[in-house]
Image (cartoon, rainbow, N blue to C red):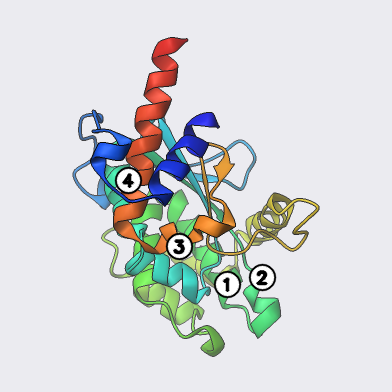
């Protein structure tokens, strides 16, 4: 946690490698998103993607219908986070919320979370997650229908099949959707009983402070944060 606080302060200033130090890094691990492994955590809701031994963990709280999440994933720091996950220095965790269905109306968030869980079962979570955000409908449209989700799944090689298609159409993972929403709400704590907001990023157990949330939309700043946390984490590990 000290490593994260140090890195955030470092990145919040003028972003220069001289200020935060050069990165040693780890060897590349995965060549493409298709190779990224995904698994469901013991808590039954956290999805982890990437190298399980990565020194940096970024835990994201997202709702599939959230337009700010889409901005993060496509034009914000999401692409840089994927690169860090691919090179094995960072693993990415997801808690998938669905509160926007109740707030805006419809069932698209729940359907999308269910479909993502079905994709995890097929070993295609990271690919499908990327495709969903690249093709996110307008928030008010509630466009994540069964048909649209299945159509998007056709863009992921090997995802479509009887098991996946049936899971989407029948909301097979309804219990997961409900549990994930509850986990999201719990993450807000007493101060935010409805949840911490989306997107929220927690780096090595420490939330990025609200006053520095702009880092999530700045790829260079976010990369600098990840590299600084990695260096500080490895330095602390060498001392113990």
Q: Residue furthest top?
A: 240
Residue for point 57% across, 64% down: 198
Residue for point 65% across, 77% down: 101
Query: Is disc 2 in contact with disc 1, using a CB cutoff of under 8 Å?
Result: yes
Instruction: Give the x, y percent position of residue 156.
Output: 29, 63
Looking at this view, is 165 or 1 the one in front? 1
Q: Which mark is residue 35?
A: none
Q: Which mark is residue 99?
A: 2
- Report which residue position mark 1 lands on: 109
Could you tell which of marks 2 and 1 lies nearer the N-terminus?
A: 2
- Report which residue position mark 3 lands on: 214
Secondary structure beneath label 4: helix
Secondary structure beneath label 1: helix
Q: Is residue 13 visible?
A: yes
Could you tell which of marks 4 and 3 lies nearer the N-terminus?
A: 3
Could you tell which of marks 1 and 3 lies nearer the N-terminus?
A: 1
Could you tell which of marks 1 and 4 lies nearer the N-terminus?
A: 1
């Amino acid at each position: 946690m000290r490593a994260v606080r140090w890195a955030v302060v470092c990145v919040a200033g003028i972003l220069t490698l001289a200020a935060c130090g050069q990165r040693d890094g780890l060897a590349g691990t995965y060549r493409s998103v298709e190779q990224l492994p995904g698994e469901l955590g013991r808590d039954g809701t956290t999805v982890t993607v990437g190298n399980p031994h990565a020194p940096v963990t970024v835990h994201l709280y997202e709702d599939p219908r959230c337009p700010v999440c889409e901005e993060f994933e496509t034009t914000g720091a999401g692409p840089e986070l994927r690169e860090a996950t691919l090179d094995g220095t960072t693993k990415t965790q997801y808690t998938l919320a669905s509160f926007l269905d109740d707030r805006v109306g419809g069932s698209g968030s729940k359907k999308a979370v269910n479909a993502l869980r079905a994709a995890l079962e097929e070993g295609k979570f990271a690919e499908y997650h990327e495709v969903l955000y690249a093709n996110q409908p307008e928030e008010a449209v509630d466009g994540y229908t069964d048909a649209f989700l299945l159509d998007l799944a056709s863009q992921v090689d090997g995802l479509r099949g009887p098991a996946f298609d049936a899971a989407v159409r029948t909301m097979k993972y309804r219990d997961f959707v409900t549990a994930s929403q509850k986990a999201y709400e719990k993450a807000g704590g007493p101060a935010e009983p409805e949840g911490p907001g989306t997107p929220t990023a927690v780096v090595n157990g420490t939330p990025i402070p609200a006053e520095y949330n702009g880092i999530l939309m700045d790829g260079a700043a976010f990369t600098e944060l990840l590299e600084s946390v990695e260096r500080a984490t490895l330095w602390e590990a060498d001392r113990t």
